[in-house]
């Protein structure tokens, strides 16, 4: 079917401005992805899936500029012992990075595997992304697969002694970065991946995660604080029997963020937790779009999203649990909540369920409202100043999402940052 | 219904519920047809047909023009495809848009002149068109006080209104209750002012088609300060084959008035699907209240999905005045495909909208139904309670919107939608849209169980129930509440459904 005229011309304009990288062993995957983009067309505001978020600036050929912001604080996760993999404006920086060898895990640059004829990642690159294109099209992810400039492929074969930290530094005001990572967790293996930093003025990131039977992956990311940055990220995960995947995202600032998570539970007894906390101020638009498919028996999924919004900030949540026929004993939980600190901010949500199995329990809750007056009064009556009390209640509100992080130390580090930011904004 | 007989139900699902759903999905009781001589307009739809319908209803020029503009618009529109329903493409030119019994060619002056065959049809449906006190078929009605039992009925048969009862008595109270075609002739100033003011001609594909070709329907006007002395009711019957029914209902509740309106519908059992595309507009002024109840029991098609009614309906209430109130109650058991979202525009300050729905889909039925609560005024309140039950190979979707505009300060919404699946071949889906644009409003979509009415919970707990038991009782008790809120006329249908509980619901 031909694309609508406008969509066609926008897609053509973007594609004309890009060249397909020399792919080597990934060439075929890249070509297939390009053809997916051409068939689907890039998103525009008329698409139902983009009802609450305008994709224009993510799609247009020239990336809008964004100033690099010096927060004057140490980068996130600096206090932890981790293996650092640094990208500056979307390009791997070997000097700033640690030595990539670590027991139980192998890390390679996409550029380095391209000239190999046989590589495990070849069977995954773009595969999970392609699977995630139905029933809803995610053209920006296909665009990423086709044109990714850099990225790493990570294979977890044991239990590495420390987390891998992907650090995304923002160097140039006009950078337009596309990164693609592939993560394979082998049977019984387990690892933690940390991600932080604003990455670029405009950032398109895609991560494909394949967790084999009994494997476990924990992903914690903190999206950078640059005020003007824009980001569209996609996380595609496929979970085998008795595997575990937990992801948490903290977002502060950024003029536009769209985080999509597409999770498929394909093995029995698998567990997926996807959580997010965001604090938005002023010209801030944050969109969490989650699609979880239950295609096996006795799996558990949790979606916990909390948004604190003020000064005209917008928070979006589109969450979906799809329980396929036969996926009995599914336990699906979904909660999205917003705390609107003033009258200008808004929360737009679509918490969806699609269920084709009768012996399941799925709950989806969504609430929105102001700070609890009674709680505020209680604290004030005990001598806590109003602004401190408001911060306390805000942190308590975010806590349910932060608690989803498995590692207590990492969770505590994120809470400490949040405390600092809230205090400074009073 | 063989599909349900051997089905394994999930632990915790009430057997009584399964039986009740089976009963509802069993043999369709209203599937017979009336053998009566009919007069049809030529098949298909075009400006000539639009003019012909307008002409048959002896409408003034402005009305014909209004219809023609709608038709012109409709031709440029695309059929919506976002609902979770699948049906073969409808050939809008392969059906009749106007069918009336021959005997209605000269409009009967009173019910006594109406063709006895038509009267017998309604008698058989349990809706006697006599100004009698006692309703046929309702057990215990004899013992009820006479005042509570009077119901005025407007009976619509295919494309025309057969007659309206109790008109004289209503007139004494100042209430106008007649067919819309009569209202266009007799009360053009009211129709002109309000028709299309809630559901604009351009609203959506089916509403626009309805605006062009609606043939009849009901009109209600309740003057300021009047509490309508009896319940009003419209009974829609489709009888003719290959005929679409397009009815239009317009209800105006002026300042401080009150009216309760009921709607029932059935159709004969046929192998080919039939289209029903209605528009209901309700205008509620200051301090007025409207209760609108529907028992939708169109022919649902057979267990293989053959035949049945496609029910594509646009219903909307506009709470224009401050403190105005509307309550939609619907029990949906019929239709092969349902596409229906009774909505509330809460414009007046402190206005209130409520939506209570039980939708039961059996066999191959598909229902995509829900509501929209658009909060525009300050201190507005809305409540949505939707219960969907799927059995056989049916698909049941709740689709809803709650929107708090920036100016709708201090507003409240509470939404709860539960679904129950009976068997593993059916589906239940929920697609809520929530848009909050100010912070003094609270919106809760099926939040935690503790959000169940605290007083009721406390009451149960006080009597020694544990929390879980108490919540279950309060939540499940609701189905019965909806049914009890239904007027007497629907007691028969309601009795069947009383056994339904949502224990063991999936989400």
Image: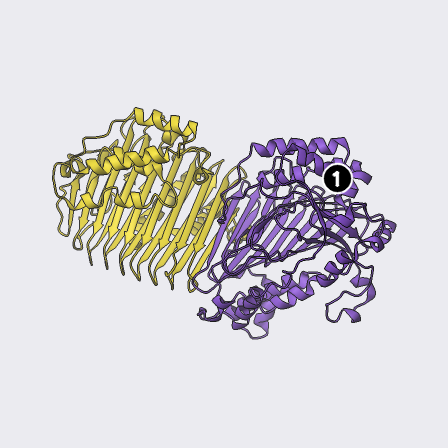
Report the side of A43 relative to B440 (left or right): left
Q: Residue furthest bottom?
A: B464
With respect to residue A189, does B245 lie above or below? above
Q: How many marks?
A: 1
Q: Residue furthest front?
A: B37
Q: Quadrant of residue A87?
A: top left
Residue with the mark numbered 1: B56
Report the side of B147 relative to A342 (left or right): right
With respect to residue B277, does B463 lie above or below? below
With respect to residue A80, does A38 lie above or below? above
x and y, in percent, of residue B333 in the image:
59, 59
Q: Quadrant of residue B53?
A: top right
x and y, in percent, of residue B323 in the image:
71, 47
Report the side of B350 relative to A181 (left or right): right
Q: Residue furthest right?
A: B172
Which is more toward the observer, B267 or B174? B267
The residue drawn where x is 69% and y is 62% is: B490
- How dense is the environment of label 1, judged by Cα within 10 Å: few (below 14), some, or many (20 and up)? few
**On what subunit does the disc labeled 1 rest?**
B
x and y, in percent, of residue B117 in the image:
76, 58
The residue drawn where x is 40% and y is 43% is: A288
Which is more toward the observer, B333 or A304? B333
Which chain's colour is purple?
B
- Regarding residue B133, the answer to whether it shows in the image is yes
Which is more toward the observer, A264 or B59? B59
- Regarding residue A73, the answer to whether it shows in the image is no
**Color scheme of the displayed model:** by chain
Query: Chain A: what color?
Result: yellow
x and y, in percent, of residue A411 in the image:
32, 51
With respect to residue B483, does A426 lie above or below? above
Q: Secondary structure at mark 1?
A: helix
């Amino acid at each position: 079917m031909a694309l609508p005229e406008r969509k066609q011309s926008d897609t053509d304009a973007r594609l004309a401005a890009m060249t397909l990288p020399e792919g080597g062993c990934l060439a075929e995957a890249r070509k297939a992805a390009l053809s997916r983009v051409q068939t689907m067309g890039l998103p525009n505001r008329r698409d139902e899936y983009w009802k609450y978020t305008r994709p224009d600036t993510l799609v247009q050929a020239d990336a809008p500029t964004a100033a690099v912001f010096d927060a004057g604080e140490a980068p996130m996760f600096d206090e932890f012992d981790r293996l650092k993999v640094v990208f500056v404006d979307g390009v791997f920086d070997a000097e700033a990075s640690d030595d990539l060898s670590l027991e139980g895990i192998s890390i390679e640059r996409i550029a380095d595997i391209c000239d190999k004829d046989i590589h495990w990642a070849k069977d995954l690159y773009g595969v999970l992304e392609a699977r995630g294109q139905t029933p809803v099209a995610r053209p920006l992810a296909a665009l990423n697969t086709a044109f990714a400039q850099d990225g790493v492929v990570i294979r977890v074969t044991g239990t590495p002694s420390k987390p891998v930290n992907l650090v995304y530094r923002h160097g140039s005001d006009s950078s337009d970065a596309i990164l693609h990572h592939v993560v394979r967790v082998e049977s019984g293996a387990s690892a933690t991946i940390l991600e932080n930093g604003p990455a670029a003025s405009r950032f398109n990131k895609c991560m494909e995660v394949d967790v084999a039977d009994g494997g476990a992956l924990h992903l914690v990311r903190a999206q950078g604080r640059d005020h003007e940055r824009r980001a569209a990220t996609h996380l595609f995960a496929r979970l085998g029997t008795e595997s575990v995947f937990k992801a948490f995202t903290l977002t502060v600032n950024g003029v536009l963020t769209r985080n999509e998570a597409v999770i498929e539970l394909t093995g029995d007894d698998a567990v997926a937790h996807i959580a997010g906390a965001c604090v938005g101020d002023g010209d801030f638009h944050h969109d969490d779009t989650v699609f979880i498919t239950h295609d096996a028996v006795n799996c558990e999924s949790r979606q916990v999203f909390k948004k604190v919004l003020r000064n005209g900030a917008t928070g979006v949540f589109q969450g979906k649990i799809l329980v396929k026929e036969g996926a009995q004993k599914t336990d699906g939980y979904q909660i999205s909540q917003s705390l609107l600190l003033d009258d200008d901010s808004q929360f737009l949500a679509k918490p969806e369920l699609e269920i084709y199995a009768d012996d399941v329990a799925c709950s989806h809750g969504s609430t929105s409202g102001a700070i609890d007056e009674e709680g505020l009064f209680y604290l004030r009556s005990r001598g806590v100043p109003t602004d401190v009390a408001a911060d306390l209640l805000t942190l308590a509100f975010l806590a349910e999402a932060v608690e989803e992080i498995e590692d207590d130390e990492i969770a505590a580090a994120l809470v400490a940052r949040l405390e600092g930011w809230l205090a400074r904004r009073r | 219904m063989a599909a349900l007989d051997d089905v394994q139900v999930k632990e915790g699902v009430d057997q009584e519920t399964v039986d009740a759903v089976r009963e509802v999905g069993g043999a369709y009781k209203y599937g017979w047809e009336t053998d009566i001589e009919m007069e049809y307009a030529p098949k298909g739809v075009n400006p000539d047909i639009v003019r012909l319908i307008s002409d048959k209803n002896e409408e003034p020029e402005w009305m014909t023009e209004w219809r023609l503009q709608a038709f012109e618009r409709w031709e440029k529109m695309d059929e919506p495809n976002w609902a979770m329903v699948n049906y073969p493409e409808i050939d809008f030119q392969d059906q009749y848009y106007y069918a009336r019994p021959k005997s209605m060619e000269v409009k009967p002056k009173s019910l006594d002149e109406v063709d006895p065959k038509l009267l017998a049809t309604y008698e058989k449906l349990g809706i006697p068109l006599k100004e009698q006190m006692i309703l046929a078929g309702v057990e215990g009605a004899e013992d009820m006080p006479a005042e509570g039992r009077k119901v005025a009925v407007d009976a619509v048969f295919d494309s025309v209104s057969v007659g309206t009862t109790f008109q004289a008595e209503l007139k004494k109270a100042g209430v106008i209750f007649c067919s819309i075609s009569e209202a266009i002739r007799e009360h053009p100033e009211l129709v002109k002012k309000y028709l299309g003011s809630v559901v604009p001609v351009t609203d959506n594909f089916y509403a626009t088609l309805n605006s062009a070709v609606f043939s009849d329907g009901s009109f209600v006007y309740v003057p300021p300060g009047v509490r309508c002395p009896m319940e009003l009711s419209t009974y829609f019957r489709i009888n003719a084959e290959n005929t679409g029914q397009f009815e239009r209902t317009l209800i105006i509740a002026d300042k401080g008035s009150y009216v309760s309106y009921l709607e029932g519908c059935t159709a004969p059992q046929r192998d080919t699907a039939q289209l029903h595309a209605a528009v209901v507009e309700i205008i509620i002024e200051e301090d007025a209240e409207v209760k609108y109840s529907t028992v939708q029991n169109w022919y649902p098609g057979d267990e293989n999905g053959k035949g049945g009614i496609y029910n594509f309906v646009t219903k909307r209430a506009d709470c224009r005045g401050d403190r105005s109130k509307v309550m939609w109650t619907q029990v949906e058991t019929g239709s092969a495909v349902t596409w229906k979202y009774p909505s509330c525009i809460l414009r007046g300050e402190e206005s209130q909208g409520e939506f209570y729905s039980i939708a039961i889909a059996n066999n191959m039925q598909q229902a995509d139904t829900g509501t929209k609560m658009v909060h525009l005024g300050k201190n507005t309140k809305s409540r949505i309670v939707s219960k969907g039950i799927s059995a056989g190979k049916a698909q049941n979707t709740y689709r809803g919107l709650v929107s708090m505009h920036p100016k709708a300060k201090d507003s409240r919404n509470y939404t709860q939608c539960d679904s129950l699946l009976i068997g593993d071949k059916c589906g239940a889906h929920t697609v809520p849209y929530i848009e909050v644009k100010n912070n003094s409003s609270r919106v809760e979509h099926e939040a935690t169980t503790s959000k169940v009415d605290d007083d009721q919970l406390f009451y149960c707990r006080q009597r020694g129930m544990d929390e879980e038991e108490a919540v279950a009782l309060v939540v499940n008790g609701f189905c019965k509440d909806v049914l009890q809120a239904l007027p007497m006329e629907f007691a028969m249908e309601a009795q069947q459904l009383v056994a339904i509980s949502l224990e063991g619901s999936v989400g």
